[in-house]
Amino acid sequence: QVQLVESGGGLVQAGGSLRLSCAGSGITFSSYTIGWYRQAPGKQRELVAAMPTGRSTNYADSVKGRFTISRDNAKNTVYLQMNSLKPEDTAVYYCNAKFEIGVVTTSSYWGQGTQVTVSS
């Protein structure tokens, strides 16, 4: 059974930092594209950062220069370091792992989400 468990969310003041973690079990992270997504109230879920296998990471324009995605394959864990947080970063953050063959996604898994709230 595949499980992704996010942690590290919380309440922080604008300008502060948080580090989110996503621990996976049942899959080998190194074979998967790992992404962090977020969903604010009343908005669609959006990609924040992704780390494809064998390709460079990519970030949403709104977080470039502030957020950094990284992975520790030995621990099957992915991190999202978030610096210079802004109130508009407030959302539920989700971890996603997807297995791709070329451009085709053959399996995709989601964590339960972790709330990040940034106060002004």
Image (cartoon, grey):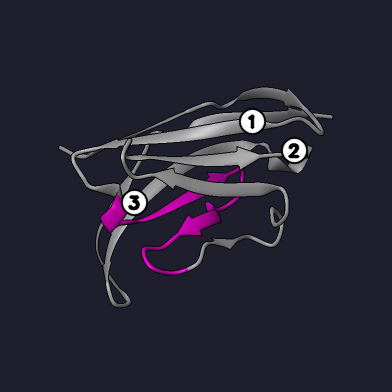
Which structural element holds mark 3? strand
Which image quadrant for residue 42?
top right
Q: Of the two numbered discs 3 and 1 on the same chain, state the one appearing first in sequence.
A: 1
Q: x, y (%) of residue 24?
A: 30, 37
- Mark number, residue 18: 1
What's the CA distance linking mark 3 and mark 1?
A: 21 Å
- Mark 1 surroundings within 10 Å by alpha-carbon count, few (fewer than 14), some (14 through 19), many (20 or more): some
Q: Of the two numbered discs 2 and 1 on the same chain, state the one appearing first in sequence.
A: 1
Mark 1 is on which residue type? Leu
What's the CA distance linking mark 2 and mark 3?
A: 24 Å
Q: Horizontal placement of 60 versus 8: left or right?
A: right
Disc 2 to disc 1: CB gap under 8 Å: yes
Report the span colored magenta. Answer: 30-55
Q: Is-magenta flag for residue 21? A: no
Give the residue displayed 21% in from the left and 40% down from the top. 2
- Mark number, residue 97: 3
Provide the residue designation for mark 2. 85
Q: Horizontal placement of 102 versus 10: left or right?
A: left
Q: x, y (%) of residue 109?
A: 29, 48
What's the CA distance linking mark 2 and mark 1?
A: 8 Å
As displayed, is residue 35 above or below residue 57? above
Give the residue displayed 67% in from the left and 37% down from the top. 90
